[in-house]
Amino acid sequence: MKINNNTKISYFDKRINLTLPEHPSEELAEFIGILTGDGYMNKYGKYFSLLEIAGDSLLDKEYLSTYVSPMIKSLFNLEPKIIFRKKQRTMYLRLMSKGINNYLLNVGFKEGKKEQIGIPSWVLENKDFMKSFIRGLADTDGSLVLLNRKQKKYTFYPRVQIASISKVLVITTSNWLKEQGISLSIMKEYKTLKYKGETKDHQLYRIHISGRKNLEKWMQLVSFRNERHLSKYKKYKESGSTGI
């Protein structure tokens, strides 16, 4: 399968030797999942195009710097600029490329606000692409929670969570995970979110994948690449019945 891509690239893109993937891949699907979780892109005026991926400057630094940044290099032959905002404890991977933004629109990523963002059809139609997409989504908009419940055998009760204000994204993702044999529930809550200085109440949808068996199914099927989640999984595995 070849991506139907008539992407217009700028003179600047040609100067920096931008390359665009011609075929769908697990790497591209995972990158779309990462963008769906913590990415943002938009055009400002006729010439200025911006793409950013945000994260916690402490918890996500290794993931963004040593995993996502090389992924961008592999996909597009560009190295993103890394920006730190210490007072906010945030960091960003930033790309300014008209060609990348146009390309991502062509392959199904949404420009601007992502309130009801979905999953591109080429990802949905392929099991390996879906695993990669969900991994990228979980690494950015997900978490592994270790509940310290009083149990005879285990120290922690694990729960994988994925949260989004997009109902269609949560429903589509949860239906696919159920088809793979993972039990889950969907919780709804209202949350006030701040976007560019404006606050707005949103209904947040949260996937809960709870329990030890479900966690192992998740790790075998999807897993994580973000060390903030992998370190918790290691902590859970090492705790056993005696604690840490």
Image: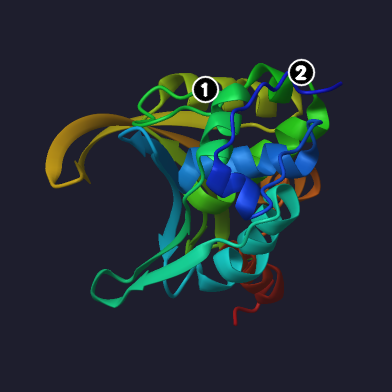
Quarter of the image with the N terminus is top right
Local packing at callout 2 (Cα closer than 10 Å; few below 14, some 14-19, many 20+) is few
Local packing at callout 1 (Cα closer than 10 Å; few below 14, some 14-19, many 20+) is some
Q: Residue furthest right?
A: 1
Q: How is the image coloured?
A: rainbow
- Count of numbered badges drawn on the protein: 2
Q: Is residue 41 above or below residue 114?
A: below
Residues marked 1 and 2 touching at CB (< 8 Å):
no
Percent of width and height locating residue 145:
50, 57
Which quadrant of the structure image shows residue 241?
A: bottom right
Q: Is residue 114 left or right of residue 214?
A: left
Report helix, strand or loop for mark 2. loop
Residue 125, numbered label: 2
The reply to whether residue 58 is in sight is yes
Percent of width and height locating residue 30:
67, 43
Q: Residue at x 50, y 25 (%)?
A: 169
Q: Is residue 182 left or right of residue 227?
A: right
Q: Which residue is mark 1?
A: 118
Q: Nearer the viewer, residue 45 or 243?
A: 45
Disc 1 residue type (three-letter): Gly
Q: Residue at x 54, y 48 (%)?
A: 12
Q: Is residue 229 left or right of residue 52?
A: right
Q: Nearer the viewer, residue 195 or 7?
A: 7
Disc 2 residue type (three-letter): Glu
Q: Nearer the viewer, residue 146 or 117?
A: 117
Percent of width and height locating residue 139:
57, 52
Labels 1 and 2: the sequence-earlier one: 1
Percent of width and height locating residue 21:
76, 38
Q: Residue furthest bottom?
A: 244
Q: Residue at x 71, y 25 (%)?
A: 123
Q: Is residue 95 above or below residue 66?
A: above
Which quadrant of the structure image shows residue 115?
A: top left
